[in-house]
Image (cartoon, rainbow, N blue to C red):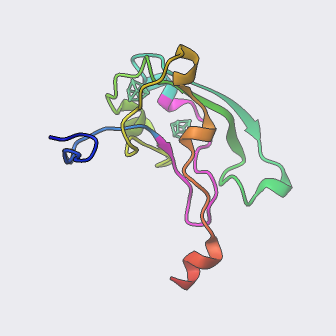
Amino acid sequence: MKYPEEVRPYSKNFRGQHSLKRDEQGRERCTACGLCALSCPAEAITMTSAERTKSEEHLYREEKYAAVYEINMLRCIFCGLCEEACPKEAIYLDGPHVTADYLRKDFIYGKDKLVEPKFDITKLAKD
Ligand code: SF4
Ligand code: SF4
């Protein structure tokens, strides 16, 4: 195939980059329970939890949230156990494949790369 002009279709079982999901109101679903990190055989996930304040109720679904959430993509073996362990439907391996880079530190993906983009709730209601 003439990659990158042509791209081979992915299998239905393809596991790509993780994405941290939002609920129907645009709030982050992750409650920093740590079950994904506990179930990860590669010890690739680390996080720091924080307490939600009154003014942050529109940002985080639960009282506790992940202030820091990082996955080391060089450690990850894309087994999907973190996805299976999550009780909040907060993490899925449904992103694109991990792209090449030069420095090891650039393979530690933080919330800036993992949390799915914010969407406009008012626009969503109109659709
Ligand atoms: S896919 Fe597997 S190895 Fe990768 S972060 Fe999740 S549990 Fe760990
Ligand atoms: S992604 Fe799911 S399992 Fe992992 S800390 Fe967040 S809520 Fe818990």
Q: Name the image quarter holding residue 118.
A: bottom right
Measuring 42% from the left and 26% from the top, which residue is drawn there?
A: 100
Residue at the limit of the structure toward the left, as seen here: 1
3 shown above or below 26:
above
| Rendered location of residue 109, percent (x, y) | 55, 30
The secondary structure that dominates the magenta segment is: loop
| Rendered location of residue 85, percent (x, y) | 42, 36
Q: Name the residue nearer the viewer: 52 or 126.
A: 126
Asked if residue 13 is among those painted magenta in the image, a careful observer would answer no
| Rendered location of residue 61, percent (x, y) | 65, 54
Measuring 50% from the left and 48% from the top, which residue is drawn there?
A: 88
119 shown above or below 107:
below
* Quadrant where the image shows the N terminus: top left
**Residue 25 seen in render:** yes
Q: Name the image quarter holding residue 24.
A: bottom right
Q: Is residue 1 left or right of residue 99?
A: left
| Rendered location of residue 63, percent (x, y) | 72, 48
Measuring 35% from the left and 38% from the top, which residue is drawn there?
A: 16
Q: Is residue 117 left or right of residue 84?
A: right
* Magenta-drawn segment: 19-36
Asked if residue 25 is among those painted magenta in the image, a careful observer would answer yes
**Residue 32 seen in render:** no
Q: Name the residue nearer the viewer: 67 or 103.
A: 103
Q: Name the residue nearer the viewer: 31 or 78.
A: 78
21 shown above or below 106:
below
